[in-house]
Amino acid sequence: MAVEFISVKCPSCGADLSVEHGRGITYCNYCETKILIQNDREHV
């Protein structure tokens, strides 16, 4: 099974980031901001 990535922008510095699909939290490689990944289609 291949790893799927989604593309997002850092809300702090605007850098393009690639995040592994299904991951809930990541960090910006450029400014080290902690980023919470949310999916509006999922309800917990």
Image: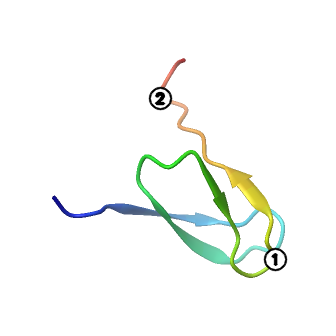
Residue type, mark 1 in image: Cys
Residue sitting at x 75%, y 82%: 30
Image position of 38 (left or right of 6): right
Q: How is the image coloured?
A: rainbow
Q: Residue furthest left?
A: 1
Image position of 24 (left or right of 4): right
Q: Which mark is residue 6?
A: none
- Seen in the picture, residue 30 relative to 21 is either above or below; the reply is below
- Seen in the picture, residue 27 relative to 35 is either above or below; the reply is below
Among numbered discs 1 and 2, the one appearing first in the sequence = 1
Residue sitting at x 58%, y 63%: 8
User: Crowding near pointer 1: few (<14 within 10 Å), some, many (20+)?
Assistant: few
Image quadrant for the N terminus?
A: bottom left
Q: Does dot 2 land on a helix, a strand or a loop?
A: loop
Residue sitting at x 54%, y 17%: 44
Residue 38's quadrant in the figure? top right
Q: Does dot 1 land on a helix, a strand or a loop?
A: loop
Q: Residue furthest top?
A: 44
Q: Nearer the viewer, mark 1 or mark 2?
A: 1
The picture places residue 28, in percent across and down from the top left corner, at 70, 71
Residue type, mark 2 in image: Arg
CA distance separating discs 1 and 2 = 28 Å
Q: Residue furthest bottom?
A: 30
User: Crowding near pointer 2: few (<14 within 10 Å), some, many (20+)?
Assistant: few
Residue occupied by mark 1:
31
- Seen in the picture, residue 8 relative to 22 is either above or below; the reply is below
The picture places residue 4, in percent across and down from the top left corner, at 32, 61
Whether pointer 1 and pointer 2 mark residues with C-beta atoms closer than 8 Å, the reply is no
- Seen in the picture, residue 21 relative to 33 is either above or below; the reply is above
Q: Which mark is residue 41?
A: 2
